[in-house]
Image: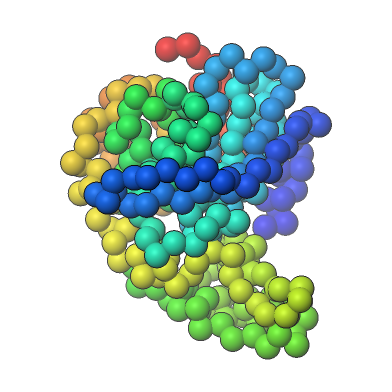
């Protein structure tokens, strides 16, 4: 994780403007779709006139809007767009909900756009966020100007349900005394998680550990109990996606050659779902935007600046 942080610090970040805004608008939605939640976000603006639709970003499982902070700051120097880095439901500072799936996260995004009167937007998502953005683009193609999917396939995921269940079991069973210091709590949590998964994943999950300054109680920023409950339903993603028509807007996939989350042999099938798509391979693992930030920025900014 130190290596990833160092990579992000190497970017030429501008003194961009960041706006953190709580949401207060509420709308009535049909009972046939999940109730949307009001998402926490950071917005980034640069010196360029915002002549193009904004870019909305979704992070992956266990992540937060902070994952897109460095990329967002650098992007606003290169594109004529506002950038929103968003905490998806059950993550970061967004509300916890009893429902967690791509359909629900799509409705959250639809509400987010309505609240800001954005008729359409460019959408970018990594991993779980990428799957949600693919669903959103196929469900509401008129709202998506173009789509960027980062290291995830709409067809399959490499982690078994059993492995993920072990990770969530370790998280929800963690029992730390409020009298412990943050460093003591982190050490115990890390040791427990290492029994379920590898170092890099543990480092990423550990960014979710919180300690209440008033009570001393430890908690996870992500809603581990609900995420575990909906884990077995992640495998139904493709069947739900197949009910929707292909998304024909401009689409780019950016994937890591050392990541198991996208398989080259799936590409012909994916192009049937996204017929106006292209794919870029970077020498990276699953966290493409952390490991190869400069190359990633070049691909994304050029794609966002295109007029097709």
Q: Is residue 216 above or below residue 91?
A: below
| Quarter residue 132 falls in | top left
Let me know if residue 150 appears in the view.
Answer: no
Drawn side of residue 134 relative to residue 258, left or right: left
Nearer to the camera, 263 or 149: 149
> Residue 246, how many percent across, how many down?
24, 30
Q: Is residue 170 above or below residue 200?
A: below
- The quarter of the picture where the N terminus appears is bottom right
Judged from this view, the residue extending furthest toward the top is: 307
Judged from this view, the residue extending furthest toward the right is: 15
- The quarter of the picture where the C terminus appears is top left
Drawn side of residue 274 relative to residue 83, left or right: left
> Residue 158, how many percent across, how many down?
36, 57
Let me know if residue 42 appears in the view.
Answer: yes
How was the colour assigned to the protein in this rendering? rainbow
Q: Is residue 138 above or below residue 79?
A: below
Drawn side of residue 306 relative to residue 15, left or right: left
Residue found 36% across the figure and 70% down from its top: 229
Residue found 62% across the figure and 18% down from its top: 50
Nearer to the camera, 146 or 22: 22
Residue found 50% across the figure and 35% down from its top: 115
């Amino acid at each position: 994780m130190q290596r990833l942080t160092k990579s992000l610090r190497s970017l030429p970040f501008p003194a961009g403007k960041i706006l953190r805004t709580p949401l207060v608008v509420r709308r009535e939605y049909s009972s046939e779709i999940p109730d949307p939640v009001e998402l926490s976000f950071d917005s980034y603006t640069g010196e360029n006139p915002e002549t193009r639709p904004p870019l909305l970003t979704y992070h992956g499982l266990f992540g937060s809007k902070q994952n897109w902070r460095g990329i967002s700051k650098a992007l606003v120097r290169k594109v004529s767009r506002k950038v929103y880095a968003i905490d998806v439901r059950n993550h970061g500072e967004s509300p916890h909900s009893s429902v967690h799936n791509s359909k629900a996260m799509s409705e959250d995004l639809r509400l987010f756009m309505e609240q800001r009167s954005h008729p359409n937007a460019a959408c970018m998502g990594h991993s779980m966020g990428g799957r949600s953005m693919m669903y959103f683009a196929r469900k509401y193609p008129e709202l998506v100007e173009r789509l960027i999917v980062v290291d995830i396939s709409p067809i399959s995921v490499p982690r078994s349900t059993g492995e993920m269940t072990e990770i969530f079991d370790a998280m929800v069973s963690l029992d730390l005394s409020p009298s412990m210091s943050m460093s003591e709590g982190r050490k115990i949590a890390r040791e427990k998680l290492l029994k379920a998964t590898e170092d890099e994943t543990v480092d990423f999950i550990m960014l979710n550990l919180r300690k209440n300054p008033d009570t001393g109680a430890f908690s996870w920023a992500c809603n581990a109990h609900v995420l575990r409950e909906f884990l077995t339903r992640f495998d139904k993603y493709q069947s739900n996606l197949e009910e929707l028509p292909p998304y024909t807007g401009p689409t780019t996939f950016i994937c890591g050659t050392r990541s198991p989350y996208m398989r080259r042999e799936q590409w012909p099938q994916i192009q049937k779902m996204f017929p106006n798509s292209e794919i870029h391979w970077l020498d990276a693992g699953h966290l493409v935007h952390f490991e190869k930030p400069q190359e990633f920025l070049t691909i994304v900014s050029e794609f966002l600046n295109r007029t097709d």
